[in-house]
Amino acid sequence: MLSFAATLTVIEAREEARRGQPLSASQKARLQELFAAHADLVWRLLLRQGLGQAQADDGLQQVFAVALRRLGEIEAGKERSFLCSCAINVAKGLAQPKEDLPGELPDQESSLDLDEQSDAARKRKLAFELLAKLDEPLRLVLVLQDVEGLTKQETAQTLGIPEGTVASRTRRAREVFKELLAARVGVKP
């Protein structure tokens, strides 16, 4: 994942070319605050929408460029929902075909021994492959709620759908995921 400094450099160059003036100190500070609080989530969400690491880096820059342009519109307390919505939209624009989804997410268990790392990597790869098989509406609610930990309300705000729809999609996504997992490992659900 790109650092804030690298992301800011690209965003500043784009915005200065677009607007003809540099970013203000308050814009930079607010963008840095958003980046520090949410960049990891946004980057993981981009990866889980089928982007490779380089595309996720590009997407991360795009999401925070949008956030910069819309700083005045982002409601306090709804920053995470706003950024997740942006990430989903950016990922759609950058997405690869489903068949080309990356096989696993970057390794996050660097302190584990090799056997545990290997087992964790296999589980991540399997989970990612199964998520890729879900229809997008089901995959999005499952990733946002069960993987990224957004609340039902935040997920509804992010996707622009009622909370009841979030609940029913989440239930259905979990059922389909369990069925896919059972079929993959050869057991009855």
Image (tube, rainbow, N blue to C red):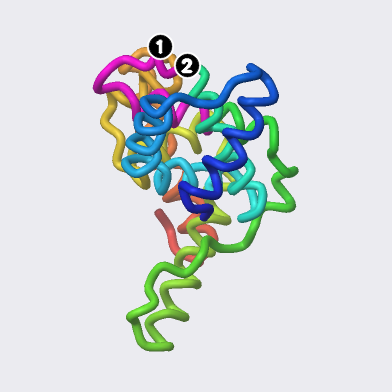
Magenta segment boundaries in residue numbering: 70-87
| Location of residue 116 (image quadrant) | bottom left
Q: Residue at x 65, y 19 (%)?
A: 20
The quarter of the displayed image where residue 95 is located = top right
Which residue lies under the disc numbered 2? 70
Q: Is residue 82 above or below residue 53?
A: above
Residue at figure coordinates x 38%, y 38% from the top left: 32
Q: Residue 7, how many percent across, how many down?
A: 54, 44
C-alpha separation, residue under disc 1 versus residue under disc 2: 5 Å
Q: Is residue 156 magenta?
A: no
| Marks 1 and 2 close (CB-CB < 8 Å) | yes
Q: Residues within 10 Å of mark 1 (few under 14, many from 20)?
A: few
Going by the image, does 94 lie left or right of 108? right
- Crowding around mark 2 (Cα neighbors within 10 Å: few <14, some 14 to 19, many 20+) is few
Q: Position of residue 54 (x, y in %)?
A: 66, 53
- Element assignment for label 2: loop
Amino acid type shown at disc 1: Glu
Number of the label disc, if any, that sits on residue 73: 1
Q: Nearer the viewer, residue 35 or 104?
A: 35
